[in-house]
Amino acid sequence: MTDPTSRLPGFGALTRADRLRLLDEATGLALSDKLAETGPVEGALVERLIENAVGVMPVPLGVATNMRVDGRDVLVPMATEESSVIAAVGNAAKRCRGTGGFFTSYSGSLTIAQIQIVGLADPQAARLMVLERFDDLAALCAEIDPMLHKLGGGLCEVEARVLDAPSGPMLVVHLVVDTRDAMGANTVNSMAEAAGPRIAEWTGGRALFRILSNLADRRVARARATWPAAEIGGPDVVEAMCLGAEFAAVDPYRATTHNKGIMNGVSAVVLATGNDTRAIEAGAHAYAARSGRYTALSRWEKTAAGDLAGSIELPLSLGLVGGATRVHPVAQASLALLGVDSAGALARIVAAVGLAQNFGALRALATEGIQSGHMALHAQNVAIAAGAVGDEIERVARQLRDRRQVRQDVAEEVLAHLRGR
């Protein structure tokens, strides 16, 4: 694969066929064959991905342009049904390219498996017993997944906590496992199920729940970027965006919507690459409440030069191997387009996309309001819902945008007029 440029001016104005052709030319990858069809998942594969399969629910897949992450241009596949998400990411990325784009870091691919032990007469002594048996647990975990151990992963730490509960104290053991380039759910769950009875035997207790935690606070990705004030509307816009971000930082009602906007971008890339969107969303929202109060995942501030600096950190338990990531043809095409070779590299890009998406929402709210741009892009959907087909769709959508009335009743009126009724 050649190193592509993420600057593809006019990309959005092309037909889908021309966009696919341009992607092939820009990347050197033959992606058009995998992406040209709207339903590329074969029936046999559907049967193996889920149970009781009756069909597929296609989600539109687009590409965000202009992204530059850690000095590398990246074309980012995003699967979403919501208008304006991809446009917002590309616009945000374009406005910070002059300052180098996005800079990221990743804490590592550590996943936690939890083991609940109950019925202990002496839970504090049991806690220490578990910590004394690290070597035994490490050997047990290595037997569960020898290949992971061979690749340098496996159990790297054991934690044990005594939690007070209404039924009495319980011991919760954490197996902290380096899952390398896998999300690792099946691996760590197998380790927890194997280790539970052994820990119960050592401590005299009873093993109950044994499963991973989706609060992946050992797999944190971080991203930052700086937007020159002149690129985003001047000092007043910088000030307004910082005040809006402060609103999200102190009020959970605002923080929830603020973080939902971030996840618009994050989940779109996670879904496009065949990863687990529910796990990522649950972990992100739990991480936002780790202080005991739900707050914003991102932070925004004015630099000494008067520009806008944004940063984000969130847990991202992503993988390149296993599950749908390995077998789904669109997921494979998306990973090829991203050009990533590790779960950490994918997580860094996803964090950058989340920050870009958040910038787009904050800037819209600080200037013309969120509905102006969103509804303009949503106009075609409204036209289709009103019954427009073919060339009628854009003609109706254009009139809705011109009138600034993106409503179905107006679309029906415009369509009737176009058809001479």
Image (cartoon, grey):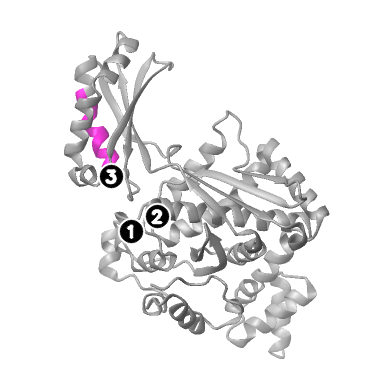
Pointers 1 and 2 in contact (CB under 8 A)? yes
> Where, by quadrant of the figure, is residue 295 drawn?
top right
- The residue tagged with tag 1: helix, strand or loop? helix
Where residue 194 sits in the image (x, y, percent)?
A: 20, 32
> Which kind of residue does numbered mark 1 sit on?
Ala
- 227, 100: nearer the viewer: 100
What is the C-alpha distance between the residues marked 1 and 2? 7 Å
Residue 275 image label = 2
Residue 186 image label = 3
> Which kind of residue does numbered mark 2 sit on?
Asn
- The residue tagged with tag 3: helix, strand or loop? helix
Pointers 1 and 3 in contact (CB under 8 A)? no
> Which kind of residue does numbered mark 3 sit on?
Asn
- The range drawn in magenta is 186-198
- The residue tagged with tag 2: helix, strand or loop? loop
29 w.r.t. 353: above or below = below
